[in-house]
Structures are given as structure tokens and as C-alpha cells.
Image (cartoon, rainbow, N blue to C red):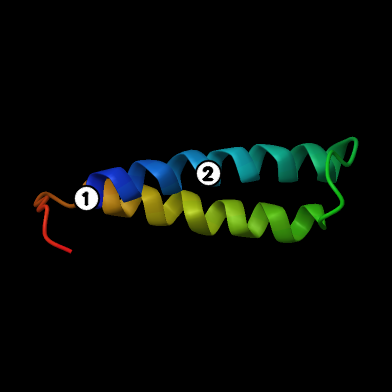
């Protein structure tokens, strides 16, 4: 459960980070502020990587 959530956060963070950086330096792909999207992407990316670094993985909620 932890690794699955971490992987989802990692992928979403990477996508948000790429779209945000493209929005800062190029064209706006969506109507959200690119700076806010980049910050959210960084937060999700680091949250996902830190969750994947954990060693134990349980199926308990």
C-alpha cells in the first residue's frame, strides 16, 4: 500500500513539475499558475520518493 501510494505520488509530482516548468519558461498548457503547479509538483515528487525509500510495506490500512 505504501509503495503504491508512493509511486502514484511520484508520477503525479513528476508530471506536475514538468508542466509547471514548461509553463514558467514557455507556453501555459493549463490555466493554473505555473509557479503553484511547480511547487505542488516538487512536494508530491519528494513525498513519493520518501515513501518509496521506506523499507516496510504492509497491506494494512
Kindly indicate the quadrant of the structure image that contains residue 22: top right
Task: Estimate how packed mark 1 is, as few (under 14), some (14 to 19) or many (20 or more) residues with alpha carbons within 10 Å.
Answer: few
Q: Going by the image, does 53 lie left or right of 9?
A: left
| Residue at image point 24% right, 45% down | 3
Report x, y in % for residue 49. Answer: 35, 47
Q: Going by the image, does 33 lie left or right of 36?
A: right
Taking the view exactly as shown, the residue that stands out farthest to the right is 27
The secondary structure type at the circle numbered 1 is loop
Q: Which mark is residue 9?
A: none
- Residue of label 2: 12
Viewer-nearest of discs 1 and 2: 1
The secondary structure type at the circle numbered 2 is helix
Report x, y in % for residue 47. Answer: 40, 57
| Residue at image point 12% right, 50% down | 57
Kindly indicate the quadrant of the structure image that contains residue 4: top left
- Residue of label 1: 1
Q: Going by the image, does 22 lie left or right of 60?
A: right
Sequence-wise, which precedes: disc 1 or disc 2?
1
Task: Estimate how packed mark 2 is, as few (under 14), some (14 to 19) or many (20 or more) residues with alpha carbons within 10 Å.
Answer: some
Q: Quick one: quadrant of the C terminus?
A: bottom left
Report x, y in % for residue 18. Answer: 66, 37
Report x, y in % for residue 48. Answer: 38, 50
Marks 1 and 2, how far apart at CA:
17 Å
Amino acid at each position: 500500500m505504501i509503495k503504491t501510494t508512493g509511486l502514484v505520488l511520484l508520477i503525479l509530482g513528476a508530471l506536475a513539475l514538468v508542466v509547471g516548468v514548461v509553463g514558467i519558461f514557455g507556453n501555459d498548457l493549463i490555466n493554473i499558475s505555473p509557479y503553484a503547479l511547480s511547487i505542488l509538483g516538487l512536494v508530491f515528487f519528494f513525498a513519493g520518493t520518501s515513501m518509496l525509500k521506506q523499507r516496510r510495506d504492509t497491506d494494512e490500512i
